[in-house]
Image: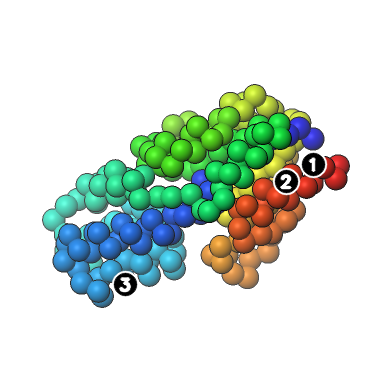
């Protein structure tokens, strides 16, 4: 197996939920939604992780906002890249993998402006060998094509295997398995009761990086 390690972005490398809470606080203050409005925003995100277009349709309706759904969503995408941060140890862990000879990439679904903004603002764009964003490529996980694009940009091929680390059992784990990759599921508690076929389960991405490094040494 080649030394290829691919990673999801949101809730795998970056703490999207913490960033969302910061965004929600700003949004609630700007629109004078009060503590109850803020709590509603956070609960909607925690309970369902809805597609943002659906989310902002609900927001606009609940608070009778004058802005269109498109305007609300665009404003979110402009602001979110400035609020996200990597989980502790992520950048160091990726650097360690590359120093050990691994090719490291990111495979993420999402709008081009939002996801590319996150990659650049956090420094992740420079911390990996390549990345593939669904909003740029016109193809989404779990389809194999997005994994293949990321692998190629890392100078690798899915045919030679590798690893995928992610928090989504369908997009990341099922998708990567279909692409012939071994998998580490980062369980953030958002898939209660779901069965999975991941090779390993962790609650922290740095532990996933340790597994990848260890697995290579044992092989």
Q: Which of the two labelled residues, at mark 1 and mark 3, occupies the earlier sequence position?
A: 3
Quadrant location of the N terminus? top right
How far apart marks 1 and 2 lie (CA) works out to 6 Å
Task: Identify residue for label 3.
Answer: 39
Task: Identify residue for label 2.
Answer: 212
Quadrant location of the C terminus? top right
Identify the residue at image location x=70%, y=50%: 210
Which quadrant holds residue 117?
top left
How far apart marks 3 and 2 lie (CA) works out to 38 Å
Residue 203 screen position, x and y as percent: 62, 61
Element at badge 1? helix
| 218 or 9: nearer the viewer | 218
Identify the residue at image location x=23%, y=64%: 28
Q: As drawn, is 215 to the left or to the right of 150?
A: right
Residue 27 visible in the shown view: yes
Residue 176 screen position, x and y as percent: 66, 44
How far apart marks 1 and 3 lie (CA) works out to 45 Å
Residues tagged 1 and 3 counted as in contact (Cβ below 8 A): no
Q: Which of the two labelled residues, at mark 3 and mark 2, occupies the earlier sequence position?
A: 3
Would you call the spot at circle 1 few (<14 residues within 10 Å), some (14-19), or many (20 or more)?
Answer: few
Residue 65 screen position, x and y as percent: 16, 59
Please determine whether, in this image, residue 36 is positioned above or below residue 22: below
Residue 218 screen position, x and y as percent: 85, 45
Q: Residue furthest bottom?
A: 36
Task: Identify residue for label 1.
Answer: 216
């Amino acid at each position: 197996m080649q030394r290829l390690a691919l990673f999801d972005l949101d809730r795998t490398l970056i703490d999207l939920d913490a960033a969302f809470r910061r965004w929600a606080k700003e949004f609630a203050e700007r629109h004078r939604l009060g503590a109850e409005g803020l709590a509603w925003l956070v609960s909607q995100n925690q309970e369902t992780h809805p597609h943002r277009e659906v989310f902002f349709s609900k927001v606009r309706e609940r608070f009778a906002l004058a802005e269109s759904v498109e305007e609300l969503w665009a404003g979110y995408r402009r602001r979110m890249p400035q609020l996200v941060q990597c989980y502790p140890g992520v950048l160091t862990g990726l650097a360690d993998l590359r120093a050990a000879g691994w090719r490291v990439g990111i495979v993420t679904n999402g709008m081009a402006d939002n996801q590319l903004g996150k990659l650049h603002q956090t420094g992740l764009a420079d911390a990996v060998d390549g990345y593939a964003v669904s909003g740029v490529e016109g193809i989404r996980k779990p389809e194999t094509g997005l994994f293949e694009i990321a692998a190629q940009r890392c100078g690798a091929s899915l045919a030679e295997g590798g690893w995928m680390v992610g928090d989504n059992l369908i997009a990341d784990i099922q998708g990567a398995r279909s692409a012939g990759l071994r998998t580490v599921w980062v369980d953030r508690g958002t898939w209660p009761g779901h069965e999975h076929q991941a090779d390993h389960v962790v609650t922290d991405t740095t532990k996933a990086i340790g597994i990848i490094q260890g697995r290579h040494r044992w092989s």
